[in-house]
């Protein structure tokens, strides 16, 4: 299974509720750049899963359009910022038939998920609009290996 973790783009500083903060113009542009880079790399998702917060859903929609994703975007509270990282493997296990999954969410859940999937103590926080790809060798329960990241400012893929 290929898992792409995508952090939402830059969001408004204020809204009546944090959950309603929408992407800024710059946030949308950065996400479009990353979406085009994913498309250029030939990335196709069999499933896109998003946090329910507005900025994450908007990010998921922009990425879905960029890579010509035709399925429904699954929205779950398992990807809210302070969710329990143990739920990530369970979430992936529920969708074990998906070969390529995008998880669109926030910090600190994304870096915690990356660390858990890679089996390491910690991973630096993802930048806004950044995407990283992890390959799970044996499906959702398998050990992960870092493949690449897409830098939001340039839209370029980098291996580390």
Image (cartoon, grey):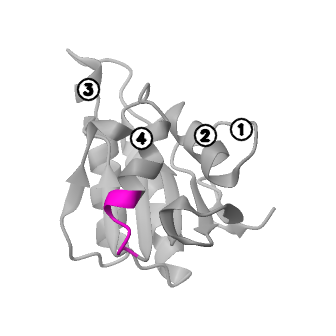
Toward the right, the furthest residue is 160
Answer whether labels 4 and 2 touch (C-beta < 8 Å).
Answer: no
Sequence-earlier tag: 3 or 1? 3
Q: Which residue is mark 3?
A: 19
Q: Is residue 34 left or right of residue 122?
A: left
Is the residue marked by circle 3 packed among few (<14), some (14-19), or many (20+) residues within 10 Å? some
Answer whether labels 2 and 1 touch (C-beta < 8 Å).
Answer: yes
Q: Which residues are magenta?
A: 93-98
Q: Nearer the viewer, residue 93 or 51?
A: 93
Sequence-earlier tag: 4 or 2? 4
Q: Which residue is mark 4?
A: 87
Instruction: Compute the Cα span from label 3 to label 1.
Output: 24 Å
Circle 2 sits in a helix, a strand or a loop, which is it?
helix
Which mark is on residue 101?
A: none
Q: Quadrant of residue 21?
A: top left
**Residue 73 in magenta?**
no
Sequence-earlier tag: 1 or 4? 4
- Frontmost of labels 4 and 2 is 4
Instruction: Compute the Cα span from label 4 to label 2.
Output: 14 Å
Q: Which residue is mark 2?
A: 111
Q: x, y (%) of residue 113?
A: 55, 43
């Amino acid at each position: 299974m290929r898992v792409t973790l995508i952090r939402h783009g830059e969001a408004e500083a204020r809204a009546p509720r944090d959950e309603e903060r929408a992407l800024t113009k710059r946030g949308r542009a950065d996400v479009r750049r990353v979406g085009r880079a994913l498309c250029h790399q030939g990335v196709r998702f069999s499933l896109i899963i998003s946090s329910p917060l507005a900025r994450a859903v908007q990010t998921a929609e922009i990425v879905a359009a960029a890579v010509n994703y035709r399925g429904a975007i699954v929205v779950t509270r398992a990807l809210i910022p302070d969710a329990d990282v143990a739920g990530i493997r369970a979430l992936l296990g529920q969708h074990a038939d998906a070969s390529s999954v995008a998880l669109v969410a926030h910090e600190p859940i994304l870096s915690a998920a990356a660390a858990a999937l890679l089996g390491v103590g910690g991973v630096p926080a993802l930048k806004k609009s950044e995407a990283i790809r992890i390959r799970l060798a044996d499906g959702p329960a398998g050990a992960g290996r870092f493949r690449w990241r897409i830098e939001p400012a340039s839209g370029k893929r980098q291996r580390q």
